């Protein structure tokens, strides 16, 4: 196959090479540029017969060659030969994708707006040609640089800038050149040369193209140069606007010999510009549909990318088809879920143990914290109990009927394949809901700390739960963040306080203890600091990599145990708030289902329907986040089957008054990341993490569930020794780690960053900056809408929260124009 490389025209063979593979696209490239001048004289017929092959873009490569001269020592500089050291570095560059990368068009448009083109350059030496190009840039009224020194710029183009007189090696420092690789070696495209340079004296980017009257021989690999492209740029530029990126744009265009032949025939600057525009259109078409020829194409033959179509009515039938497909997909790999990492190669027993401990604490401690918050907010009663008190209904029976209706609707959703509707929830919607949950984690921690300060620092004591019904507590028994833990078996004993605790004014005012409030704040922040520091410890240079990974995986339990001991034993004289435990109520007491009237059962059906929508959305949303392409899971999904299992399990939990379960955010994505092999990679100076593989096992979740069950034996001691500020610090830690990979949050941060610090992500390369910020603003408005309803102070307003999430679909599809949707689809 043919390849394209970018090499310095006169440098020796390189010592280091970094390869970057090109994705797709087809370009017509010459086999030997030495015959380019002869082909021009032979005419189009001879050219078509000799150079009409289409070369796959997958085999096209660029080399960037950077020459850095190291100044010789005193003894060497004094030697007659003027010896020195020359550092040569080469790397592959991808071809510019004109169909996806918006900057390719911006670079060309900027050049065409203030084009610096020299059509008939008569100079013969490289220095004279470059000096003429710099003078042309300086004389252009659009390209004025007040502090620019042409002599300094001229010197910076070569390796001998600043070198001693005796040790000067007059070579170009940074160049881009194309070559074609054959079975016999490498043949250089010697008719064009792209020279790039960065200088602090420049204020903006400049491009100049010079066409020489005659081919010039400027040394090895540059024997017949006809085109010189000079790119100048400041060093502090956005990652997509650097000199290398601009040079990559024009180098991709000049890689095509047909285009270069056309440029040789142009007589005016306008014809030259028209040829550039035509080449851009051709490259865009070839990037859009690489299977077409560069000669024979028409608009009717151009393929288009069609987004996935919404599910149709026939997709939901026959009943149970999705469940059968899920079982057929997952059943063959079901045994591997228990043996991978235990039997055979690539054992990961240590990682399984640390992940199990992480998942155990991540499920147990939020359960205690949510129960404690609900106990404070409602004085021992959850929202459904408040409804039952308002309408004089039996709580256990009403709770059971609500759960049964919820399970009934979830089973219907699973049987009729309604999880297909979640395909309408694009990643943008998932990120909004995920960030909303992270925000509620933070608000829960802040709200709990405010209550501690009100109680111990200011002397305010709220004993009536009816006065605090407006707080963002759990919806119909869920957590305050509209998110219940997978293992919430302890919630019942924490939420259902004894009747005497719910009476108005049953507790007297607490004496002021400001040391308790200050210590609580320090304990919460200390828990956050230690847990997040250990979580990031795997990036530090200390200890062995295996030990760093263990400390990172065990960050949560280590921080909780450490500050629980500090609070309980280091400051025994200071009273700290702990959660209440009520051992008088049995966990396995069946509800009396016949004690409710038909009207009450109908009301429970309405609540169960709203609750089922919330379960349906969050279960599928969390599953989609866990199975995101960047997580590289390979065993397949089971959305319908998982939903049916949730319905079956919640049926039994409802009958005994136990909390319902479903997939939890951010526990599930964090669980996947804890089992992942993560590597750090560098692109354009930016460090980012990527998942290489994930150990897909059921052992960790099974082990964590068993440990949570045994935790019932740890009540009231030692679990009750965990102070509330530690749990609030846990909330902050979970929120902080969950937004780590949230693209919406990353794009919000871009508003505060300098453009030169923008990471080279796919949406930065493909989408205009204005549209990125427009789309981010649209997502922020939807996030504020969710917060307004999910944290509303109006009674029962949170019950319509699932309807608000459903209403976000037409916002994504109906309120955004079609061209904007096509651009936005590149972001997510």
Image: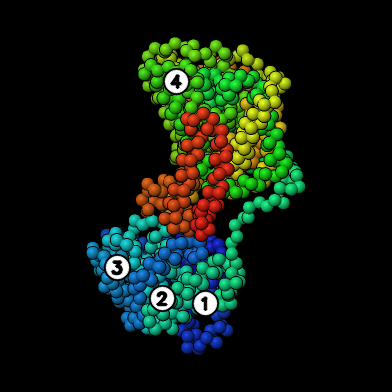
Disc 2: CA contacts within 10 A as few (<14), some (14-19) or many (>=20): some
Q: Secondary structure at mark 4?
A: helix
Residue 210 vertical position relative to residue 617 in the rendered view, above or below: below
The residue to which callout 3 is attached is: 143
Residue 748 relative to residue 619: left or right: left
Numbered badge on residue 30 = 1
Disc 4: CA contacts within 10 A as few (<14), some (14-19) or many (>=20): few
The residue to which callout 2 is attached is: 273
| Mark toward the start of the polypeptide (3 vs 1) | 1
Q: CA distance from mark 1 to mark 2?
A: 22 Å
Residue 93 relative to residue 195: left or right: right
| Picture quadrant where residue 581 is located | top right
In this view, the residue in front, 480 or 70, is: 480
Residue 257 vertical position relative to residue 744 in the rendered view, above or below: below
Residue 7 vertical position relative to residue 361 in the rendered view, above or below: below
Going 62% across and 55% down the picture, which residue do you hit?
308
| Mark toward the start of the polypeptide (3 vs 4) | 3
Going 54% across and 69% down the picture, which residue do you hit?
285
Q: CA distance from mark 2 to mark 4?
A: 73 Å
Residue 561 visible in the shown view: no
Q: How is the image coloured?
A: rainbow
Q: CA distance from mark 3 to mark 4?
A: 65 Å
Going 66% across and 25% down the picture, which residue do you hit?
600
Q: Secondary structure at mark 2?
A: helix
Residue 385 pos. (x, y %): 58, 22
The residue to which callout 4 is attached is: 566
């Amino acid at each position: 196959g043919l390849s394209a490389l970018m090499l310095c025209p006169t440098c020796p063979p390189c010592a280091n090479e970094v390869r970057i593979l090109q994705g797709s696209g087809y370009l017509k490239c010459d086999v030997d540029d030495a015959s380019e001048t002869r082909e021009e004289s032979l005419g189009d017929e001879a050219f078509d017969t000799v150079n009409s092959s289409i070369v796959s873009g997958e085999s096209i490569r660029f080399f960037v060659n950077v020459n850095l001269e190291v100044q010789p020592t005193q003894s060497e500089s004094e030697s007659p030969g003027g010896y020195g050291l020359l550092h040569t570095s080469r790397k592959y560059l991808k071809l510019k994708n004109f169909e996806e990368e918006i900057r390719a068009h911006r670079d060309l448009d900027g050049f065409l707006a203030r084009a610096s083109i020299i059509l008939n350059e008569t100079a013969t030496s490289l220095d004279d040609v470059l000096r003429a190009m710099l003078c042309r840039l300086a004389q252009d009224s659009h390209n004025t640089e007040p502090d620019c020194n042409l002599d300094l710029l001229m010197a910076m183009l070569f390796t001998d800038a600043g070198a001693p007189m005796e040790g000067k090696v007059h070579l170009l420092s940074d160049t881009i050149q194309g070559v074609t690789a054959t079975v016999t070696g490498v043949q250089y495209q010697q008719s064009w040369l792209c020279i790039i340079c960065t200088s602090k004296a420049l204020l903006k980017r400049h491009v100049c193209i010079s066409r020489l009257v005659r081919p010039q021989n400027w040394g090895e690999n540059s024997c017949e140069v006809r085109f010189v492209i000079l790119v100048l740029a400041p060093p502090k530029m956005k990652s997509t606007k650097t000199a290398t990126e601009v040079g990559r744009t024009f180098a991709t265009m000049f890689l095509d010999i047909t285009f270069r032949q056309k440029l040789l025939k142009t007589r005016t600057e306008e014809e030259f510009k028209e040829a550039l525009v035509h080449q851009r259109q051709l490259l865009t078409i070839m990037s859009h549909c690489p299977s077409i020829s560069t000669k024979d194409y028409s608009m009717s033959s151009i393929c288009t990318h069609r987004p996935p179509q919404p599910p149709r009515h026939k997709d939901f039938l026959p009943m149970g088809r999705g469940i059968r497909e899920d079982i057929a997909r997952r059943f063959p790999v079901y045994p591997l879920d228990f043996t991978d990492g235990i039997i055979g190669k690539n054992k990961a027993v240590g990682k399984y143990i640390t992940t199990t401990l992480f998942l155990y604490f991540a499920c147990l401690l939020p359960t205690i914290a949510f129960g404690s918050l609900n106990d404070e907010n409602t004085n021992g009663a959850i929202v459904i109990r408040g409804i039952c008190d308002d309408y004089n209904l039996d709580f256990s029976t009403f709770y059971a009927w609500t759960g049964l209706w919820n399970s009934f609707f979830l089973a219907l959703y699973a049987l009729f394949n309604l999880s297909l509707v979640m395909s309408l929830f694009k990643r943008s919607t998932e990120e909004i809901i995920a960030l909303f949950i992270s925000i509620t984690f933070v608000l829960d921690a802040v709200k709990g700390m405010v209550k501690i300060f009100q109680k111990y620092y200011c002397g305010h004591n709220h004993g009536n739960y009816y006065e605090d019904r407006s707080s963002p507590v759990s919806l119909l028994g869920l957590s305050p963040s509209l998110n219940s833990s997978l293992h919430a078996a302890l919630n019942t004993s924490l939420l259902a306080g004894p009747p005497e605790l719910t009476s108005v004014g049953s507790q007297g005012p607490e004496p002021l203890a400001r040391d308790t409030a200050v210590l609580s704040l320090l304990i919460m922040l200390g828990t956050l600091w230690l847990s997040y520091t250990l979580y990031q410890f795997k990036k530090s240079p200390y200890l062995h990599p295996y030990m760093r990974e263990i400390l990172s995986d065990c960050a949560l339990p280590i921080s909780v145990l450490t500050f629980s001991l500090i609070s309980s034993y280091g400051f025994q004289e200071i009273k700290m708030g702990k959660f209440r435990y009520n051992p008088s109520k049995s966990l396995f007491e069946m509800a009396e289902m016949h004690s409710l009237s038909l009207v009450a059962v109908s009301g429970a059906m309405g609540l169960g329907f709203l609750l089922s929508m919330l379960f349906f959305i969050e279960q599928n949303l969390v599953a989609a986040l866990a199975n995101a392409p960047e997580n590289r899971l390979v065993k397949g999904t089971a959305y319908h089957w998982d939903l049916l299992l949730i319905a079956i399990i919640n049926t039994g939990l409802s009958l005994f008054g136990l909390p319902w379960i479903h997939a939890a955010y951010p526990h599930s994505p964090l669980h996947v990341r804890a089992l992942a092999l993560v590597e750090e990679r560098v692109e354009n100076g930016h460090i980012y993490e990527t998942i290489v593989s994930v150990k897909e096992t059921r052992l960790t979740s099974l082990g964590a569930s068993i440990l949570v069950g045994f935790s019932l034996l740890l009540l009231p001691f030692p679990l009750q020794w965990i102070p509330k500020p530690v749990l609030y610090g846990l909330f902050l830690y979970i929120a902080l780690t969950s937004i780590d990979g949230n693209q919406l949050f990353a794009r919000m941060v871009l508003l505060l960053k300098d453009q030169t610090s923008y990471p080279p992500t796919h949406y930065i390369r493909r989408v205009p900056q204005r549209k990125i910020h427009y789309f981010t603003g649209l997502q922020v408005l939807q996030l504020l809408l969710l917060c307004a309803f999910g944290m509303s102070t109006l009674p029962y307003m949170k019950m319509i929260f699932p309807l608000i999430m459903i209403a976000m679909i037409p916002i994504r599809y109906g309120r955004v124009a079609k061209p904007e949707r096509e651009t936005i689809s590149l972001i997510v």
